[in-house]
Amino acid sequence: MELIMEAIETAGYKPGNDCLIALDPAASNFYQDGKYVLTRESADLTSNQMIDYYIKWAFSYPLSALRMD
């Protein structure tokens, strides 16, 4: 996320004003044996912990929520 924020600013835009970040994490790709395995963070998270992880990001980065019907 930090790299994305840096890229936005390097391109001359202001995150949160000029653009937002959308996520499509495809969580099923890193869900193994009842846990979300975050290899880079060396963490295995429960569903509730994964939700908390996303909430932390929502308060830290300019995320956009998209609804696709």
Image (tube, rainbow, N blue to C red):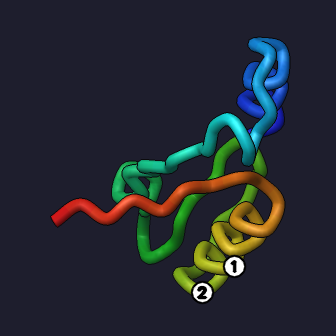
Q: Find residue 58 and report its horizontal and vertical position in percent.
A: 70, 66
- Find the distance from the CA under tag 2 to the CA under tag 1: 6 Å
46 and 16: which is toward the camera: 16
- Residue 38 is situated, as x and y percent measured from the top left of the image, at 64, 53
Which class describes the residues within 10 Å of circle 1: few (<14), some (14-19), or many (20+)? few
In the picture of the structure, the residue carrying the numbered disc 1 is 52
| Residue 31 vertical position relative to residue 7 in the rendered view, above or below | below
Residue 1, quarter of the rendered image: top right
Residue depicted at x 82% and y 36%: 2
Q: Nearer the viewer, residue 19 or 31?
A: 19
Residue drawn at x 35%, y 58% is 28
Image point (76%, 53%), residue name: 61
Question: Considering depth in this image, is 29 or 12 the residue closer to the camera?
Answer: 12
Contact check, label 2 and label 1, Cβ < 8 Å: yes
Dot 1 falls on a residue whose secondary structure is: helix
Q: Position of residue 7 (x, y in %)?
A: 76, 20
Q: Classify mark 2: residues with Cα within 10 Å, few (<14), some (14-19) or many (20+).
A: few
In the drawing, does residue 58 fall left or right of residue 24? right
Q: Is residue 37 above or below residue 29?
A: below
Q: Quadrant of the C terminus?
A: bottom left
Of the residues shown, which amino acid type is indicated by label 1? Asp
Numbered-mark total: 2
| Above-or-below relation of 63 to 33 | above
Q: Secondary structure at mark 2?
A: helix
Q: Residue furthest left?
A: 69
Identify residue for label 2: 48
Q: Amino acid at mark 2?
A: Asn
Q: Which mark is residue 2?
A: none
Q: Residue at x 60, y 86 (%)?
A: 48
